[in-house]
Amino acid sequence: MATTIRRAVIPAAGLGSRLLPLTKAIPKEMLPVGDRPVIEHTVRELVASGITDITIVVSGGKNLIQDHFRPNPGLVAQLRADGKTDYADAVEEVAELAHRGHITYLDQHGPYGNGTPVLNAARGVDEPMLVLWPDDVFVAEVPRAQQLIRAYETTHCPVLALMPMDRSDSRRYGVPVVKEDLDDGLLRITGLIEKPEPEAAPSTYAAIGGYVITPGIVDELREQTRRWHEHRTGEIYLTDAINAFASRRAVYGQVIQGRWYDTGNPADYLVAQFAHALAHPDYGPVLRRLVHDIDQPTTGTTT
């Protein structure tokens, strides 16, 4: 589909420390949710939303990501020779997905922080682009990326993905300061407060890690990088650039319709796995029977 936004960035250079020791040898982006690694869910969402230029920003030890999306004609030939046509088709389809998204890879360079991979991918680019984290899985009738693109096409301004939250959960999220509530879940915001106490939360919405970034936000990130040694943590964050931009220019939030699963910590990763399996036509009935059996009282005698 034609879209005003062609490019997307997936920052995938993190250590996955919240999932150690599981992520000691396996990048967190390659952990499975259902029958595909979590980063593939993100790539599929982008391609389904019309994105034709995807940059994955990586660090050392992330070769498995490239290997997953790279064509493997030898494996395909062996599978076909063994009569495993469905598996061969699935392997080829992943490589075709990468081709349609025109995936390229960059090694992350610069100060620590989630703003650095955005800057790495923005070199020489003077157009809006999507930024999606690789440990989020969205289940929605209209892909989250497409919802963000539509919001940008309405506003021509930076857009953040938002979801309603219980105020008691505010310590987990960046919470937007809402200036104006417009139609269809579109909000004019003036900034983000990172992980406020519930009584200080400026709204009941959470920023959930999807962005349309404009060249103005990139300029703010460059300015932060020039002054990175002045930051109290020495890190470059996208939130800081958005707040600086929002103090002078319009920024919007789009309330996303759908379900969001964060796979970045053990409990939420298990929830994502379980929810995806329940929705699967083959696995769902098996899990429901298992849950039913676990809930039944045990019979028999003990000695």
Image: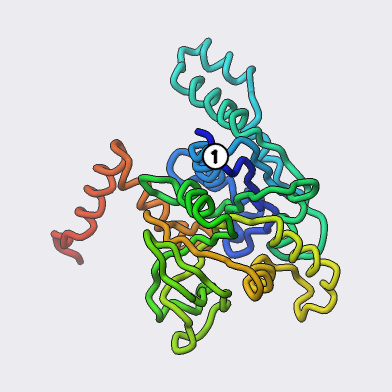
Q: Between 54 and 63, which is closer to the camera in this rendering?
A: 54
**Residue 200 as seen in the image, left or right of residue 110:** left
Q: Residue furthest bottom?
A: 199
Q: Between 70 and 175, which is closer to the camera in this rendering?
A: 175
The residue to which callout 1 is attached is 3
**Residue 274 as seen in the image, left or right of residue 287:** right
Q: Position of residue 295 (x, y in %)?
A: 20, 60
**Residue 68 as seen in the image, left or right of residue 284:** right
Identify whether 81 is placed above or below 218: above
Q: Position of residue 45 (x, y in %)?
A: 50, 42
Q: Position of residue 141 (x, y in %)?
A: 36, 45
Q: Position of residue 276 (x, y in %)?
A: 37, 47
Q: Between 189 and 231, which is closer to the camera in this rendering?
A: 189
Identify whether 150 is placed above or below 221: above
Crowdedness of circle 1 by 10 Å Cα count: few (<14), some, many (20+)?
few
Identify the residue shown where x is 15% and y is 63%.
301
The secondary structure type at the circle numbered 1 is: loop
Identify the residue shown where x is 51% and y is 74%.
176
Report the colour scheme.
rainbow
Q: Look at label 1 and name its amino acid.
A: Thr
Question: Dividing the image into 4 quarters, which one contains the C terminus?
Answer: bottom left
